[in-house]
């Protein structure tokens, strides 16, 4: 991308509201991968203005409970890791790693007793109790405290987190100093009732209508009709069924939920899925880090070219696209948006964060990682076909098209998904200022992108140590 003459003087002048019709404050979506999107990811992404999509492999009752928890979460204060005073130190340390703020709140009957940090647990027996490790020196704030007030309280008290409590000292949520800064920059993605938003993926096999009804009843804000090859008859028929259920739901409730469908990489694919009822098209065949499609089948298309063509076709039809896959650096998000994507979906990159669904593991060098796997891999297929016979499951597992186990290491500098959001949005905002754009629509209109050689790409890499 080459720079244009610009009168945008600050990155904060750039409005990153998505152009896909969902109008989320950030154009970023956590992929519907089992190793990525769960309740923690959904909460965090929505709190910072993005979206997460629950995978299709999760039972509908589990998804319903997760969405209910997301909807009940505070839109500004982070959900705390809570333990009782009798919880063991070992269990407490295991729970603390579930959240990037690195603190557990000790509660009794929802009232705050104290805080436990990993540092306080050093040298303690793992069967000791959290009450023995906690500090009662807690920075408390009101639930309606503004970010600047929380930041000032933490600066004055030298505490790691502030705890929001109601008049009866019952826990509402927590916020770190960096969280306070973020709350002053990001706006949450909220539904019509002011609750955090999330999406649900629905496969094209089985009783599609029943699965869509279950997702809508659970409170899904977006439906994602998902299969690797979206331009096929089975997708079209499933999409038509989903659109019928969605339209009935809209008549009953007055709320029209948008349907995302894919994946496609051509304008013909866009046209056919839009005709079947899609509002947004998911674009990408083979660019994902866990995907072996291109090497295994020879099928796919370079992601920028696919997004460019599909976005143009979607725009003519009054719809939009999500760029799905191939995102490894902030530049990839910027280029996808420059090509016309309404939002960008990120999978494996987000798998290596505190908020993803996997457990924290460590290798022989002590490096922390989480496992990731492709949604067409044998591992994912085994989960997806759990209700079929043993023979059918075994046969389906023979047709693997994705990596079943990969280590996604947590970046020590950016271990949380919020850290990655900071990095990505900083790059995208800066790219927009180079293009002279204040909105993502202006960015797509004004960005000038050219073909780059391998040597040109290498020339742009930063040098972290002397050569």
Image: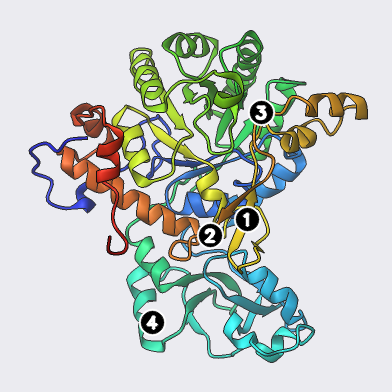
Query: Mark 3 highlights which residue?
Result: 401
Spatial separation of the CA atoms under disc 1 and disc 4: 34 Å
Query: Mark 4 highlights which residue?
Result: 153
Spatial separation of the CA atoms under disc 2 and disc 4: 30 Å
Could you say where residue 210 lies in the image, as x and y percent from the top left? 74, 25
**Left or right, 210 with reference to 324:** right
For discs 1 and 4, the disc positioned in front in the rendered view: 1
Q: What residue lies at 32% left-to-right and 27% top-to-bottom?
A: 340
For discs 3 and 1, the disc positioned in front in the rendered view: 3
Spatial separation of the CA atoms under disc 4 and disc 3: 52 Å
Spatial separation of the CA atoms under disc 3 and disc 2: 25 Å
The answer to which quarter of the image holds residue 233 is top right
Secondary structure of the residue carrying numbered label 1? strand
Query: Mark 2 highlights which residue?
Result: 410
**Left or right, 285 with reference to 129:** left
Residue most extreme to the front: 467
First-in-chain label (2 vs 1) = 1
Query: Mark 1 highlights which residue?
Result: 370
């Amino acid at each position: 991308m080459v720079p244009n003459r610009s009168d945008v003087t600050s990155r904060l002048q750039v409005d990153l509201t998505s152009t896909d019709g969902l109008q989320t404050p950030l154009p970023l979506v956590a992929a519907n991968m089992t190793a990525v999107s769960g309740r923690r990811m959904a909460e965090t992404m929505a709190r910072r203005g993005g979206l997460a999509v629950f995978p299709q492999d999760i039972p509908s009752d589990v998804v319903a409970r997760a969405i209910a928890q997301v909807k009940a979460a505070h839109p500004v204060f982070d959900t705390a890791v809570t333990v009782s005073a009798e919880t063991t130190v070992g269990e407490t340390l295991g729970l603390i790693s579930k959240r990037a703020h690195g603190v557990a709140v000790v509660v009794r009957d929802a009232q705050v007793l104290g805080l436990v940090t990993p540092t306080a647990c050093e040298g303690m027996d793992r069967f000791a109790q959290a009450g023995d490790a906690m500090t009662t020196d807690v920075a408390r704030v009101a639930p309606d405290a503004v970010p600047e007030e929380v930041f000032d309280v933490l600066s004055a008290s030298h505490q790691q987190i502030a705890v929001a409590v109601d008049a009866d000292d019952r826990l509402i949520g927590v916020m770190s100093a960096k969280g306070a800064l973020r709350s002053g920059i990001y706006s949450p993605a909220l539904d019509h009732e002011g609750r955090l938003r999330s999406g649900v993926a629905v496969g094209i096999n089985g009783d599609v209508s029943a699965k869509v009804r279950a997702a809508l009843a659970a409170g899904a804000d977006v439906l994602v009709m998902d299969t690797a090859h979206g331009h096929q008859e089975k997708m079209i028929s499933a999409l038509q069924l989903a659109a019928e259920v969605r339209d009935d739901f809209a008549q009953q409730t007055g709320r029209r939920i948008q349907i995302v469908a894919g994946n496609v990489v051509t304008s013909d694919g866009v046209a056919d899925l839009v005709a079947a009822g899609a509002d947004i098209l998911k674009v990408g065949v083979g660019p994902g880090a866990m995907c072996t499609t291109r090497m295994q089948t020879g099928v796919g298309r370079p992601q920028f070219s696919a997004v460019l063509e599909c976005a143009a076709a979607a725009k003519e039809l009054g719809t939009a696209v999500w760029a799905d896959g191939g995102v490894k650096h902030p530049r990839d998000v910027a280029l996808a948006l420059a090509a016309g994507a309404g939002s960008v979906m990120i999978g494996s990159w987000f798998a290596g964060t505190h908020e993803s669904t996997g457990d924290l593991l460590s290798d022989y060098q002590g490096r922390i990682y989480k496992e990731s796997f492709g949604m067409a891999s044998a591992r994912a297929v085994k989960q997806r076909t759990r209700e079929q016979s043993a023979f059918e499951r075994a046969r389906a597992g023979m047709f693997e098209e994705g990596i079943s186990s990969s280590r996604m290491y947590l970046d020590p500098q950016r271990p949380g998904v919020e850290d990655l959001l900071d990095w990505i949005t900083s790059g995208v905002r800066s790219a927009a200022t180079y293009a002279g754009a204040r909105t993502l629509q202006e960015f797509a209109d004004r960005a000038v992108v050219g073909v780059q050689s391998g040597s040109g790409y290498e020339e742009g890499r930063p040098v972290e140590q002397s050569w």
